Amino acid sequence: MAHTAMSGTGTIAENDPLQTAVWRLRSRGCWTDAAALLAPRAGAAPALQRAALLVERCLFTGDGWGEAEDGLRTAERAGRGRRRPRRGGL
């Protein structure tokens, strides 16, 4: 495929090869495969990206809501681990 025919995250040489692979799978409707590439990665950003892929799959197929919910909960836990303490009120 011509490089100029692609657009979005993962399509330029400076991007992470993982993101390129995720983008290509996602663009072909292979959300589960794309999410599987992100599963071994630690941290909130990969967990949130994985959850987004799983939710997108649900919106297109109507299936997999349980796995998407698990992905969101995993992302939430990962995000809480990096949360900075609040300063001041509230």
Image (cartoon, rainbow, N blue to C red):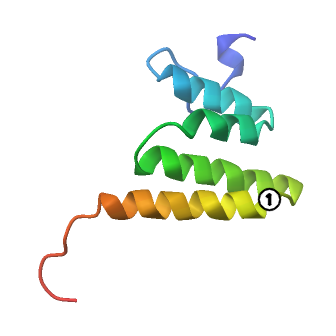
| Left or right: where 72 falls relative to 59 | left
Q: Amino acid at mark 1?
A: Leu
Q: Quadrant of the N terminus?
A: top right
Rendered residue at 68%/59% (across/down): 68
x%, y% of residue 34?
67, 35
x%, y% of residue 45?
44, 47
In this view, 8 is above or below 78: above
Total labels: the figure holds: 1
Q: Which residue is at the front of the view, 28 or 5?
A: 28
Rendered residue at 58%/24% (across/down): 20
x%, y% of residue 14?
44, 18
| Left or right: where 36 falls relative to 13 | right
Q: Which residue is at the front of the view, 21 or 6?
A: 21
Residue 10 shows in this picture: no
Question: Label 1 crowding class (10 Å Cα cut-off): few <14, some 14-19, many 20+?
Answer: few
Residue 65 shows in this picture: yes
In this view, 6 is above or below 77: above
Q: In the orientation shown, which residue stands out farthest toward the top?
A: 2
Rendered residue at 60%/53% (across/down): 51
| Left or right: where 27 falls relative to 79 | right
Report the residue marked by disc 1: 59
Q: Quadrant of the C terminus?
A: bottom left
Q: Which residue is at the front of the view, 2 or 42?
A: 42
Determine the secondary structure under disc 1: helix
Asked which quadrant contains residue 77, the reply is bottom left
Rendered residue at 52%/52% (across/down): 48
Q: In the orientation shown, which residue stands out farthest toward the left?
A: 88
x%, y% of residue 27?
74, 34
